Amino acid sequence: MNQAAPIRVLIVDDSASVRQTLAGILAAAPDITVLGTAADPFIAARRIQEEVPDVIILDLEMPRMDGLTFLRKIMAQRPIPVIICSTLTEAGSRMLFEVLEAGAVEVLPKPRIDTRQFLMESSIRFCDAVRAAARARLRPGRAPSRTVEAKLTADAVMPPPLPGRAVAETSRIVCIGASTGGTEALRDVLEALPAECPGIVIVQHMPERFTAAFAKRLDGLCAIAVKEAEDGDAVRPGQALIAPGGRHLLLQRSGGHYTVAVKDGPLVSRHRPSVDVLFRSTAQCAGSNALGILMTGMGDDGAAGLLEMRRAGALTLAQNEESCVVFGMPKEAIDRGAAARIVPLDRIAHEILLADAPTPPRRPASAK
């Protein structure tokens, strides 16, 4: 039985210590190999001429040519999946969106090695990002590894729902989960929504300090208000709350109103924030009043939670394969029977508005 070839990665960063750290992290993964490293884009270009990598990890601040310029040249001349690894995108919404719009598959902060836990989480984050990037731009005949790794479920943050427990009816709430490719997909959805829309709660897999910039940029582009969620925030019509990177986001209910809780906790389904955690909390406190949507991303985070939402009476949707950057999370949900419908990206905003539309009263059978 033939084993899939390892994913070949080129690391481009002017810091020798960062190159060494990233090379060490990736070399520990059996399905990833470091093709080489480069201290600037000119050296990287020569290496690409010798052998084209499957994925490039690219810094933004470098001598002779900045990373954004190099990214644009790559995408114009020879598209290769690129992961941006930089501190510049952590606080600047403009830079974050520029690299995403230029074609970066993922944006990550510099790896943290100050404690064992941070090093472990950086390792998980970078290896998963490389796998997702390689899958987003597959070469003909290549298939990604299907190795199943041990991971925690939403049980680590909150207990499973009690069978048969009903949820009282209240206003409609929309919960969305996304990962690789989700930043631009979410922008498409939220930009298409009018200011009069149901309250939205979002988990997009992003590192800490990135989501504030992401939310700020979306807020400037959309008719609805968009903000990074804070503990105790009310979920309001015409507003989207985005889970802060590095924290779990849960939906809570007080009477007929919803708020969110921001909590620490372990990685769930290999992520924090986890879509499974948000979806489980929504199933428990919103029931049939919710709409759950699982969008593009690698892995299976959100599939179990979406099934819990469907069993609680919620309407559930999965993004279709053709419009996904990576058809991983939606596929898992579909395979488990968690998605009531499969829809393309350009239909999701319409489905949100359709779900919030009042149901017309049924006419008596005797009416003419």
Image (cartoon, rainbow, N blue to C red):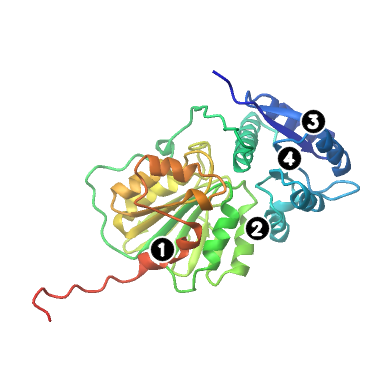
Label 3 to label 1: alpha-carbon separation? 46 Å
Name the residue tied to disc 1. 351
Of the numbered discs 2 and 3, the one sitting upstream in the chain is 3
Of the numbered discs 1 and 2, the one sitting upstream in the chain is 2
Of the numbered discs 2 and 4, the one sitting upstream in the chain is 4
Label 1 to label 2: alpha-carbon separation? 27 Å
**Amino acid of disc 3:** Gly
Of the numbered discs 3 and 1, the one sitting upstream in the chain is 3
Helix, strand or loop at disc 1?
helix
**What residue sits 44% from the left and 64% below the top?**
199
**Amino acid of disc 4:** Ile
Label 2 to label 4: alpha-carbon separation? 21 Å
Helix, strand or loop at disc 4?
strand
Helix, strand or loop at disc 2?
helix
Dot 2, crowdedness within 10 Å: few (<14), some or many (≥20)? Answer: many
- Of circles 2 and 4, the one toward us is 4
Extreme-top residue of the structure: 1
In the rendered image, residue 272, in percent from the top left (x then y), is placed at 53, 42
Name the residue tied to disc 2. 213
**What residue sits 49% from the left and 66% below the top?**
239
**Amino acid of disc 1:** Glu
**What residue sits 81% from the left and 40% below the top?**
13
Dot 3, crowdedness within 10 Å: few (<14), some or many (≥20)? Answer: some
State if disc 3 and disc 2 touch (CB < 8 Å).
no
Name the residue tied to disc 4. 57
Label 2 to label 3: alpha-carbon separation? 32 Å
In the rendered image, residue 5, in percent from the top left (x then y), is placed at 64, 26
Q: Quadrant of the N terminus?
A: top right
Helix, strand or loop at disc 3?
strand
Q: Which mark is residue 36?
A: 3
In the rendered image, residue 229, in percent from the top left (x then y), is placed at 53, 57
